[in-house]
Image (tube, rainbow, N blue to C red):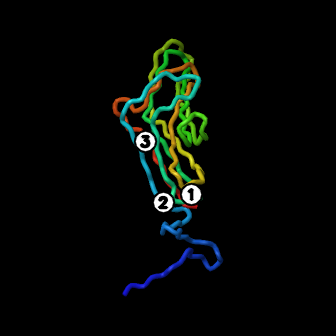
Amino acid sequence: MASELHVDAIKHSGGTSALTIDSSGSVNIPGSVIQVVTSETTTQISGTASASEVALGFTGTITPKFASSKIYVTVDLQSAVTGVMSNYAVGFKVRRGTSASDPLILESRFGHYANQTNVNRELYSTTTFSSLDSPNTTSAVTYSTFVINIDQNPNWRISGNSGRSTITLMEVAQ
């Protein structure tokens, strides 16, 4: 016959909680990664940067197991910007939600600055950026990517030539 131990928490002798078990049986060990969700695309997305944020249509969704968890968000965009002026740049952003008015989680700028004029330049890069978010929910959370003009409305491209762009979401127990 198997033995069973029924507990809600295991505590250090000093009284601090080392781990908790919720009513569904999920174990919460502070600092541990509970789950990892990755979304990727090799489909090219492109356009011309404008003064308003434009959704790239590239998202990742995670459903936290604990409302107290933090979500580590990391984005790798296989990106390119093209311009025929001396200075041009775009801003890539990640928001918690699908609208440009949703909370900004992270942002990165990518472009070209030089004293040359009327020189056509195309810059390629893996634009990588990350941040830790506190959504405070156990409902599904979607993180969406956006692009906005920073300087001179350049053309931009994500995942050109089948480059792989990814969003990775990690739930970290608190």
Badge 1: how crowded within 10 Å, few (<14), some, or many (20+)?
A: many
List x then y, in percent, for residue 166: 43, 42
Q: Nearer the viewer, residue 155 or 115?
A: 155
Which is more foreground, mark 2 or mark 3?
A: 2
Between discs 2 and 1, the one toward the N terminus: 2
Between discs 2 and 3, the one toward the N terminus: 2
Which mark identifies residue 28?
none
Between discs 1 and 3, the one toward the N terminus: 1
How far separated are the C-alphas under marks 2 and 1? Answer: 9 Å
Which mark identifies residue 34?
2
Q: Are marks 2 and 1 in contact (CB under 8 Å)?
A: yes
Q: Are marks 1 and 3 in contact (CB under 8 Å)?
A: no
Which is more foreground, mark 1 or mark 3?
A: 1
Q: Quadrant of the N terminus?
A: bottom left
Which mark identifies residue 69?
1
Q: Is residue 32 above or below residue 82?
A: below
Check disc 2 and report its element: helix, strand or loop: strand
Badge 2: how crowded within 10 Å, few (<14), some, or many (20+)?
A: some
Q: Residue at x 56, y 20 (%)?
A: 87
How far separated are the C-alphas under marks 1 and 3? Answer: 22 Å
Q: Which kind of residue does numbered mark 3 sit on? A: Thr
Q: Which kind of residue does numbered mark 2 sit on? A: Ile
List x then y, in percent, for residue 120: 46, 16
Residue 159 left/right relative to 23: left
Q: Nearer the viewer, residue 164 or 71?
A: 71
Quadrant of residue 125 in the image? top left
Q: Residue at x 58, y 25 (%)?
A: 52
Residue beneath label 3, please?
166
How far separated are the C-alphas under marks 2 and 3? Answer: 19 Å
